[in-house]
Structure formats: structure tokens, C-alpha cells
Image (cartoon, helix red, strand yellow):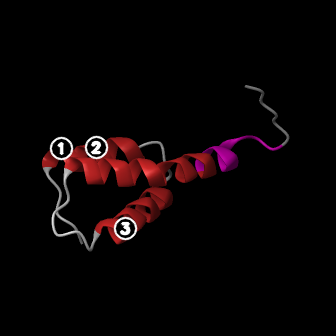
Amino acid sequence: MISLTDTQFHFLMDLTKPLLPADQTAFLQALVKRLQHQPEIGDRALFEAALELMPGWYYRKLKYAAPQGCKSEI
């Protein structure tokens, strides 16, 4: 368990909105595991840890959300 300020809590809730509920839980558990040994969690430490973990979760969501056989080009 970690302690967060209201601002930090709202940041995480906004960040995880696009994820499926199960993925939200898994992401938040991974974040807690990464930060649990820090005596105090500042905004910068939280934001950096969250943003480092997040790309894999968004990629996973998009990978499973795309219709099968769908090809997209960027």
C-alpha cells in the first residue's frame, strides 16, 4: 500500500481510464510494487514510474481491441 495526495490519485485514475478494469488493477498493482519501498512518493517519482509502465498497458489494450485481420498504417 502507498499513500497518495488527491492530485496524485486523480492523475492515476485519469491515466488508467482507457484500460479494461482488470488491466487497471494489474497496472496499479505493478505501480505499487515499484514504489512501495520509497519512504515518500513525490509527484515526479509517481509520474515517472507511471509513465514508464504505461506504454506496455496501452499497447496490450490496443492489441486485443483491434478487430482480427484489421491492418492499420501510420
Magenta segment's dominant SS is helix
Q: Circle 2 sits in a helix, a strand or a loop, which is it?
A: helix
Q: Residue at x 18, y 43 (%)?
A: 7
- Say which amino acid is labelled 2: Phe
- What residue type is disc 3 on? Arg
Marks 2 and 1 in Cβ contact (< 8 Å)? yes
Looking at this view, is 25 or 7 the one in front? 7
Which residue corresponds to the image point at 39% horizontal and 67% vertical from the top-left? 29
Q: Position of residue 27 (x, y in %)?
A: 44, 60
Residue 10: x and y in percent read 24, 44
Along the line of sight, the residue nearer the viewer: 73 or 62: 73
Image location of residue 49, percent across then percent down:
37, 55
Q: Residue at horizontal 20%, vertical 59%?
A: 41
Q: Quadrant of the C terminus?
A: top right
Query: Height in image: 41 above or below 6?
Result: below
- Counting residues from the N terminus, which is met first, the one under dot 3 or under dot 2? 2
| Quarter containing the N terminus | bottom left
What residue sits right under mark 1 in the picture? 7
Q: Which amino acid type is shown beneath numbered disc 1?
A: Thr
Q: Which residue is mark 2?
A: 11
Q: CA distance from mark 1 to mark 3?
A: 19 Å
Q: Is residue 42 left or right of residue 22?
A: left
Q: Which residue is mark 3?
A: 34
Local secondary structure at mark 1: helix
Disc 2/disc 1 C-alpha distance (Å): 6 Å
